[in-house]
Image (cartoon, rainbow, N blue to C red):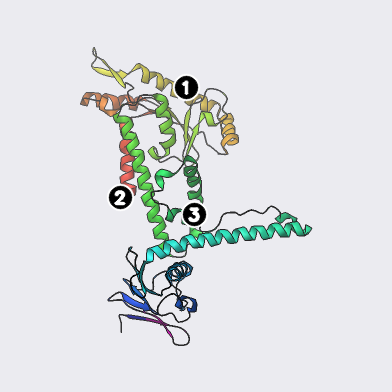
Amino acid sequence: MANQIEHKDDDGNLIYQINKKTKSGKYFLVKADKLRSYVQDPILLKGFDRLPKGFYKDGFGLTLAGLLIVQEISESKKKKIKLTVTSNKQSKIDMRGRTIALTLSEAFLNNTGTKIRGIKRERNAQMIAEAKNSLGNLFSQYRNLKNSTVGYIPGKLGEILTSETNIIPKLADSDRLALEELIPAYLEAIPGTLRSKKKLKIVFDALDAGRKIYLDKVLKEFRKKLDTGTQNENLWQKFLSEYILLLRHNYGEVLEKTSVSLKGKFPDFMLVDPYGYLDIYEIKKPSTQLMKLDSSRDNHYWDVELSKAIAQVENYIYQVQRNATTLMTDIKDSKGIDVNIVRPRGYIIAGLRSQLKSTKMKHDFRILCDSLKNVDIILYDDLYDSLNSFVSKTTGK
């Protein structure tokens, strides 16, 4: 029958049969002599179109978790068990009859099995470490085995992640730091270990989901700072230094003056593109006034603060080019990065497009920007819109 699954051992003994249409079946205790002492033959299966986890496929019955559970119940009540394993999450027990009617969920068996396997692995690791210690103490040839300790036990991380509920809010800073270091290393190792396109898809789907969550959080934080009027220049410097590679995603490296042993007057903030070319960034506040009106000529000119910032960036460009060899050496020694200093551009992040309240102001702003030789002005809301557009394209949001 097309809907009937039957599995037999090499001697032709029926181990289990399952009707895929009704999702019901039976598991026969062909070789499970110990289990027969506690459980009636056969074990009933409900809600499955396959053999559930927690069973041996060769007729030896339940794996250790299930065996220990039925043993405890049967021996404590001196009764045999009529056992049903179900696909839903509800387990129940009825002890009123001559036999105990016991229903165990597959999820319960799996969770218990995971915990028991973890205990076994930990115990085995401890025994192996103790054996190595004893060997090291006995023979000089094995003295390097003295003081052997139990290292990471395979399966421990999976046990923690699957057994704990609502784990994210409970993570300490040390947990988050460890995960941030582990995940990139794990992802780097994946291409050489995965064999299945399905597994790769799961990984990449998870990466896409994680990236979307991360980018959404950055956008939300950026929007919040703009909406609440955060005007502390140091706070913006810190925020942009952390996320500038997302906001200006044509760069590959951030260089801050405090992280490089620079001698002399150099900018606090520089970016290196994928080809190693260096550009200069100056961070001002969103509230920085962009222009003032010359009413006698009906034209706008740069506000004093922005004019000072432009002059400062032009001076940085001059200093960087003049001391290019020294700067490249300092960056190489401090960060291990080879940079190219060839006509670097300067960028000033300041102000908001909402200041440009008329068509005349927008035109004058463009004229003033075009008149700058080596410096570009980037408005905060333009920077936000650029990231928002990038997120939409890359995540399909």
Towards the viewer: 262 or 361: 262
Q: Residue 222 versus residue 51: which sits nearer the camera?
A: 51
Q: Residue furthest right?
A: 140
Pinpoint residue 351: horizontal percent, then vertical percent: 32, 26
| Residue 376, image quadrant | top left
Check contact, mark 2 vs mark 1: CB within 8 A.
no
Say whether disc 2 or disc 3 marks the residue closer to the N-terminus: 3
Which residue is identified by label 2?
396
- Amino acid bearing label 3: Leu
Question: Magenta region: which residues?
Answer: 6-17
- Residue nearest the observer in this picture, 85 or 384: 85
Q: Is residue 15 magenta?
A: yes
What amino acid type should be assigned to the residue bearing mark 1? Asn
- What whole-number distance in Å separates the C-alpha atoms at marks 2 and 1? 42 Å
Q: Give the residue pinned by disc 1.
A: 315
Q: Which of marks 1 and 3 precedes in the sequence? A: 3
Disc nearest the viewer among 2 and 1: 2
In the image, residue 62 above or below residue 306: below
Residue under the point 23% across and 16% down: 298
Q: Residue at x 41, y 57 (%)?
A: 203
Assess disc 3: are there few (<14), some (14-19) or many (≥20) residues with their C-alpha within 10 Å of its C-alpha. few
Residue 393 image position (x, y, % from top left): 32, 47
Decide: few, some or many residues near mark 1? Use Cα within 10 Å; few <14, some 14-19, many ≥20: some
User: Helix, strand, or loop for circle 1?
Assistant: helix
> How far, Cα to Cα, is label 2 from label 3?
32 Å
Residue beneath label 3, please? 157
